[in-house]
Image (cartoon, rainbow, N blue to C red):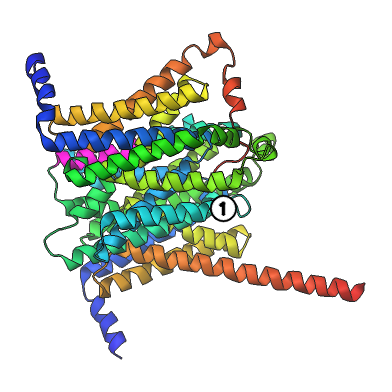
Amino acid sequence: MGVASDIRQMFGYPFMVNAFRAGTIVAIASGSMGWFMVLRRQTFAGHTLSLVGFPGAAGAVLLGVSPALGYFGFCIAAALVIGLAVRTDEAGTYREESALIGSVQAMALACGFLFVGLYHGNLNGLTSLLFGSFLGITPGDVLALLLVAGGSLVALCLIARPLLFTSVDPEVAAAAGLPVRPISLGFLVLLGIAVAEASQVTGSLLVFSLLVLPAATAHVITGRPLLGIALSMAFAVLVTWAGLVIAYFTPYPTGAFIATLSFGAYVAARVIRLGSHRSRFQASVASAGVRA
Amino acid sequence: MDTPSMLGSITSVFSHPFMRDAFLAGTGIAASCGLVGYFVVLRGQVFTGDALSHVAFTGALAALAAGLDLRLGLFGATVAVAVGMGLLGRSARADDVVIGSVFVWMLGLGVLFLSIYTAGRSGTNGTQGVSVLFGSILGLSPAAAGTAALIGVSVCALIIAVARPLLFASIDEAGAAGVGVPVRALGIGFLAIVGVTAAETTQAVGALLLLGLLAAPAAAAHLLTTGPYKGLALSCGLAVVAVWAGLLLSYVFGWMPPSFAIVATSTVIYGGAAARSRVPVGRRGRTGAGRHELRTPGGDV
């Protein structure tokens, strides 16, 4: 009874309603993009994209334009740079490449710090860029998020089948005449858009929690694409809602709870799968013993 | 700013005690970062270094939230996680999804500790969190600077002491194990040293900018020379130069935070090295083959 009235009271605040709307949109977008990102093993690229959003947003604040512009601009630009510059076909270049990506990451973050310093900014602005804030989301923001997410989901649906094909087996896809490079570049741009969207809710440092963890959990549970994407989106939405509710009733930030809840779900899925593997293994050993 | 006054301000740098402390601590930190970073890049463990920087953030804020000394959490968390990763090691190789999942959860915890800490003290307003993330080398106390320099020197001495077997183990693990080099213990010990370095560097440039000092000078050294001892010395020297130049730059140009100036300098050094190594590649043919031999069989731990 008390819980129900508490929840009703929570939705009495317009900012919480907006936060739930924005969180749901962002969770659906990053759940679906994240599934493909985990499938394609591009988590390091996703990590870099999410960090690049921070100097983008800080620079936009410094110039007096909307941080959303900075997030989208920098994330999409970084996606293009990574897609065009990094050759994934040479596995041996990994060492030099990771040193390069690491240096670029540090430089991007340092620039973000400089921009915030130049802004003579208050530190609350900095922490909300880094760790996210669900307060102060306006209905206009929600509409913008909805339009961008809708557009990128439509684009994802259009390239989903060839993208799946090229992700699972790039050589055969290339042999079948699919434009592998443009497709992967297009996907990176979509990923950049999803990261830029999610950054506005979770902050640059915790985007990963919505992008990687629900998708990784779905991959642990099922290998089937459609079911996996649906599960990934559902997990992302659930942890976002739960994170928002917990953050509403405690003085602590949303991102921490979203990260912890989705990590818990991931660990639980791994443990359950480990258990079922072991019992299946034991069953097969037992049946083999019976046959022998 | 015209030249004479710039020179004047550079000579007046050392009249400030906080600048002397910053140079003292910064030199020790940079030298250890350069030496350790050379091996980190050689062994393909940049992503592991990235992981440890996230851990450093969480450890520091956990200690602050619990009311302990910041450095206790920094060193405790990074060394414990580094040794844990080393123990899991090759047998239970974590892929990038697993590493990424653990990182982001660690960061989430760090954020939670940050808000617990700031909620407990109304005035501080997250300043400590920001200085853990982005460093505060100019804010070190003389005692802290002395400790940082001492730890830096000890790390350097340790690395130099194990340089020969560590090089052998990094380049040809099977061969080293065959001759009786304790490869596994060496790998775990090295990760512990990386943990100490990460904690140490977090005090100077912050957890988020760690790779700027750990990876960039070392990567530049790898691009400029293939000789291991030359590379070690070069990497160490470049890191020290980056810190000195960064400190001077931020002293002369007051709007530049020192951690930005340090990371920017080391990135410029890396960019220069990359440009230099790229230009004559057509003439030299595939000199990259020399580097190819240095490649480790495994990637990240």
Q: Which residue is mark 1?
A: B94
Q: Is residue A46 visible?
A: no
Give the camera-side residue of A21 and B193: B193
Residue type, numbered disc 1: Ala
At a point 48% along the width and 46% down the height, the residue shown is B191
State the residue lying farthest toward the right: A292
Please give the count of numbered marks on the rendered protein.
Answer: 1
The quadrant of the rendering that contains the N terminus of chain B is top left
What are the residue bounds of the magenta stretch?
A: A105-119
Image vertical order of residue B156 relative to residue B273, above or below: below
Give the camera-side residue of A278 and B175: B175
* Disc 1: CA contacts within 10 A as few (<14), some (14-19) or many (>=20): some
At a point 46% along the width and 20% down the height, the residue shown is B224
Image position, residue A20 (x, y; %): 32, 67
A112 magenta-colored: yes
Residue B19's quadrant in the figure? top left
Image position, residue B71 (x, y; %): 29, 53
Image position, residue B86 (x, y; %): 53, 51
B93 magenta-colored: no
Image position, residue A48 (x, y; %): 41, 42
Q: Is residue B294 visible?
A: yes
